[in-house]
Amino acid sequence: MFEEFGFETLTAPQAAVIFALAIGAIFGALAEVTKFCLRRSLIGTDKLAARAIWLIALGTAIATTQAALSTEIISFDDHRWSSSSLPFVAVILGGLLFGAGMVLTRGCVTRLAVLSASGNLRGVYVLLVFAVVVHATQKGILSPLRVWATSFTIPVTERGSLLPTGTFLSIAVGVLLVVAAFTLAVRQSLSIAHIVAAIAIGGLVTLGWIGTGFVLYDDFDPIALESLSLASPASDTLFWTIASTSVSANFGVGLSGGIVFGAGMSALLFGRFQWQSFSSPAQTGRFTLGAVFMGFGATLTGGCTLGAGLSGVSTLSITAIVALISISSGAIMTHRLMWADDPSSYESGAPSSTQQQQPAE
């Protein structure tokens, strides 16, 4: 399809970087405005409102992705989310670790990327550690552990999906989820602007699939079928930053840069940019451990809450669904274990005996 547009100065991989930069910037701005974060939807003080936003986005992503599949403009036949085998040890272990990590760092990777662009140096630090660990798990000293964990598999459906994809039933699943989440949003008195932003976030997932799988498809210079994610893009961005003369920028690099740019512009525009950093060595240590957990966990599960959760589940992949359930379970269990005596103190990052509260990140 790409060659039909008649571009003379851009290849498909180059155009993919620009495309990713654009959808990343839109997502970053929307995520900054809505405080889009799975962690907040599970254990935040405003978890019901945050949950409504997250589920509206997820339902929209499912419905629109399945609609795109029904028209056959995209296909996941050879994609990793369509595998007929579930690496259950890697996905469950990785999900639990990622969930624990996002509680320790008080934000999923998506939220921390947005906070980094808003002046939060804790987020910048976590993203750097996260990217290093992802790269080490993919190609470095931690890769033997990844290979070992992914060796344990069980068969699932032929196409690896929960339901037949691209059908009326699969589209209806997404629509029903949006309706249910919209009801919750109304009960939580969410503004129309936030509801529309959540729908737009879900739509960006499908736009990513269509952009890389149809519009930019080129038989002579193929690119990977990708959408919103932050695990591999963080690693790609780190590697490209330190070796740009040897490797070219790709979709992930453009997406990461776009998210930070969009979130930063939104924070500046609405006066929410504020420099923040660590308050103690103990907090630094906790955030470091959380970043390591998230980096290792995201690689095992095949993505973070954005890549495996929002984008992965839009394909109705059993692997992605198990990953999302495992991440959520890990977050809830870690929160209950560490802040059982005083859950409210979690928002200040203080021990359970401390009663001081601060606004959630």
Image (cartoon, helix red, strand yellow):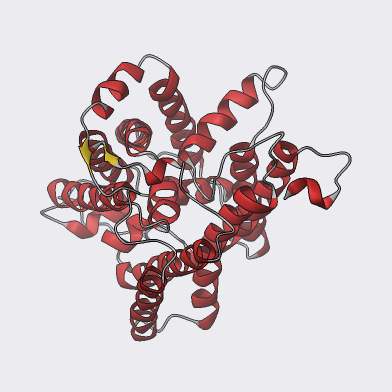
Residue 245 sits in quarter? top right
Q: Is residue 244 left or right of residue 27?
A: right
Q: Residue at x 42, y 24 (%)?
A: 138
Q: Confirm whether residue 297 shows in the render.
A: yes
Does residue 291 appear left or right of residue 148 in this picture? right
Q: Tell me if 343 is positioned left or right of 302 in this view.
A: left
Residue drawn at x 46%, y 24% is 135
Q: How many marks?
A: 0
User: 313 or 192: nearer the eye?
Assistant: 313
Q: Farthest residue in the left direction?
A: 341
Could one spot residue 273 in this view of the protein? no
Tell me residue 12's x, y (percent). Answer: 73, 40
Q: Position of residue 244 (x, y in %)?
A: 69, 22
Closer-to-camera residue (293/303): 303
Task: Examine the rendered structure and indicate whether residue 48 appears above or below residue 112.
Answer: below
Quarter of the view holding residue 278 = top left
Position of the C terminus, as image quadrant, is: bottom left
Q: Residue furthest right?
A: 8
Residue found farthest to the top: 141
Q: Position of residue 225 (x, y in %)?
A: 55, 44
| Residue 228 on image: x %, y % | 52, 50
Name the one closer to the observer, 203 or 124. 203
258 and 82: which one is in front?
82
Q: Is residue 55 above or below residue 335?
A: below
